[in-house]
Image: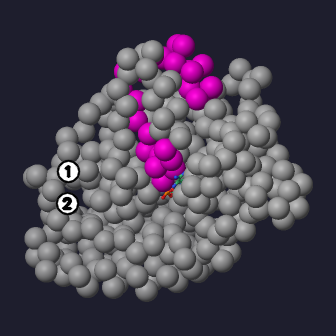
Amino acid sequence: MILSIESSCDDSAIAITEIATKKLLFHKKISQELEHSVYGGVVPELAARLHAEALPKILEQVEEYFPQLKAVAVTATPGLAVTLVEGVTMAKAIALALDIPLIGVNHLIGHIYSLFIEKESEFPLTCLLVSGGHTQVMEVKSLSEIETVAKSMDDSFGESFDKVAKMMGLGYPGGPVIQELAKDGDREAYNFTVPLHQSPLIAFSYSGLKNAVRLAVEKADGDTTKYKDIAASFEHIATKHLTMKLKKYFKTNKPKTFAIVGGASANLYLRAEIEKLLKPHNAKLILSELKYCSDNAAMIGRVAIEMFERGEFSSLESLQSAPRSLL
Ligand code: KG4
Ligand code: ZN
């Protein structure tokens, strides 16, 4: 079995995965959403302190598996420097105490493998990662052959939902609340400009749209009845930006199997619009189970099985957390 730890942002999670069967034997996550909500976003130092409390609590519950552990895996990159180190330090202590190998996992690859929890992997695929920290399209041929073909130049898709919710005083995370508010709104009510629509670049940008929404919220001047239309128009344009760029990309790179992963892949409007986009290409859409879209340790454990089988271990000295990923 492999014990895996996730602490890259505001979720403390630990999983136990059986190597031979890929079966998830234990998974527990303690989210800090409530604690960060009053600040409208994640406060790194608060997150680190909460991980330091939550991770040992979860670890106590898996002690019975210790004799059967063959490795300990941990998210090492990317993420918040002060929170990554909480998981990495715990993983190193476990590796040392139990004398088992250490596996450092890339969180973005974790999101890709969230598609294959308790399943065989299926490659090649084109993968859209939409989370709080990332918006990128990757061509994935295998664990070690991942090419990023488009990414955001500034904010991410999920983060823009968080910022819009913050402007409306709706707390954190913004994705689910904005989605809920948008359901009853008019998507055409506000004519926000689609980011980079005149640019030939296949890249993403959310800072301009965020500022346009800020002006609309200010103009509403506290009239919260306008918020559902603002939310709906924002969600429409934020999604249209993704589908327009993907459409352009598909002209030269026909999709066969397409996946959406990351916390914001739970967005139903996005899922529906991508489905429409894939239809003429007869491409297959694969998604993670809803409970594994947002950060979790099950996906880290799933990647770790592949790395274990390839013998990709790190030494106690060489494994360092790194806020920025090379992907
Ligand atoms: O993958 P994740 O849990 O953490 C990172 O790796 O960043 O993603 C969290 C992000 C947050 O920005 C959250 O607002 C967004 O995913 N999110 C959504 C939805 N559910 C979560 N964004 C849009 N629509 C949703 N339904
Ligand atoms: Zn994530």
Image coordinates of residue 108 in percent, x first then y, are: 45, 49
Which stretch did the figure color magenta?
243-268
In the picture of the structure, the residue carrying the numbered disc 2 is 24
Seen in the picture, residue 142 relative to 36 is either above or below; the reply is: above
Q: Residue at x 60, y 78 (%)?
A: 45
| Total marks placed | 2
Dot 2: within a 10 Å radius of its alpha carbon, few (fewer than 14), some, or many (20 or more) residues?
some
Image coordinates of residue 22 in percent, x first then y, are: 16, 52
Image coordinates of residue 222 in percent, x first then y, are: 84, 65
Q: Are marks 1 and 2 in contact (CB under 8 Å)?
A: yes
Q: Residue at x 31, y 80 (%)?
A: 58
In the picture of the structure, the residue carrying the numbered disc 1 is 118
Work out whether residue 158 or residue 192 is closer to the camera in this orientation and state it.
192
Q: CA distance from mark 1 to mark 2?
A: 6 Å
* Residue 195 highlighted magenta (yes or no): no
Query: Quick check: can you spot residue 263?
Result: yes
